[in-house]
Amino acid sequence: MKKTFKKIASQLHLWLGVSSGLVVFIVALTGSILVFEDELEPVFYPKFHLVEAPKDQSPLPLDNLRATVANAYPDQRIARIAIEHHADRTVLFDLVKGKKEKDVLSVAVNPYTAGITDTRRENDSFFHIVLQLHRYLCLEDTGKAITGVATVMFIVIMITGLVLWWPNRKQTKQRLTVKWNAKFKRLKWDLHAVFGFYVLPFTFLIAVTGLVWSYKWVNGMIFLTLDGKAQQKREAPANASTHNALSSGSNALANGAALWTNISGTPGTLAKITVETNRLLPHPGRVLFTLPESDSISITVSKVNDNAAIANVVDFLYFDRHDGHLISKRLYSEETTGMKVRRLVFPIHTGSIWGWPTKVLALLVALITATLPVTGVIIWIGRKFKKKEKVMKRTSAPGKVASRAKAAAS
């Protein structure tokens, strides 16, 4: 019974590994690149992200920066504004045309001069391409389906791999150490089995959390299990006021007509919202403004809490887009258990949950995971080649016997 179980596990491990190996390799390798995306972005695109912060000078009001962008791109709508808490960072504006946001133009603005420092199409940025390859193999919905299936297969591979690895008492030391001076046959097995064992708990977590993006039902299970009900749809509330402040802002329009393009409000609305956000949420962290297309929907402002013990702790505030007064709050401390656990999925998957230590660990795990399909295929090819050699020896043996008999008879 035990041998039959191991034989089934061996066949599943082999053929699922051969079937999903290339996808697992691509996903693991691209995942290792994405681990330090936030740290590498300013290195890859310094002009886009970095500015020289003048001494004793505060950033200009956000409305001034917005006026610059609106004047430069009057035919596009500002969908988001991102403000980093570092003094040497640009303020980033995401521009879109119409309702669809597939082709986003990002504009970087110097917060001290209101000058545009750089622009880029997000679809063409390095990390966006890597992310598309990681999640969709650059094949959109088809690629998403492939990576989802490959992830499920990889989870089965890990379970069957553990079954095949599990040692008896005499094998424990062998299964836990790599014999670097061994012959290639033993070394390739060690690199696959021993390294695979050590990264298995972390790779398993990464794979399981990855299923949240592949399958909606996995995401739904988090809320059904922990909250006892389906995930509640979160939308920005309607504006408390319904008046159109364009008339009251006529003086501002005279000074810069593009200031209120795609958003109605009184002068200094965005600056007022920024001050109120930092007053209510005084901790350091990235602030993101989401400006809906509809004039009847409020502005959503989210702020990351960099002082939190774990990553992805975010609070949400909703402001009236006409006069900037606070409409409602959605604080992290008041979220349901399901939502808090859901927010842990991303930092666990990327390794950012406890900062640099877990990021370094995630990088190593992803790189080792990328080697497993490679070493697995090498082992498989080696075994196939060995079987061919045995067959050839067997088929050539009768000929040799016959020739020896013929020689003896003569």
Image (spheres, rainbow, N blue to C red):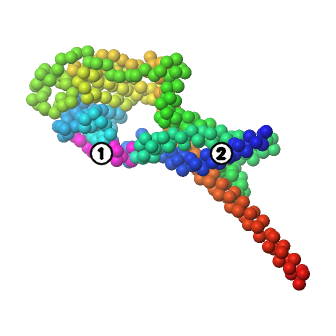
> Residue 196, relative to residue 301: is it above or below?
below
Residue at the image point whose x is 9% and y is 29% from the top: 254
Q: CA–CA distance between discs 1 and 2?
A: 44 Å
Q: Mark 1 points at which residue?
A: 120
The magenta stretch spans residue 33: no
Q: Mark 2 points at which residue?
A: 13
Q: Which of 408 and 225 is in front in this view?
A: 408
- SS of the residue under disc 1: strand
Residue projecting furthest to the right = 409
The boundaries of the magenta stretch are 110-128
Residue at the image point whose x is 28% and y is 22% from the top: 298
Residue 361 point in image, percent of width and height = 56, 40
Q: What residue type is labelled 1?
A: Arg
Q: How many marks?
A: 2
Residue 406 point in image, percent of width and height = 86, 79
The quarter in which the N terminus is drawn is top right
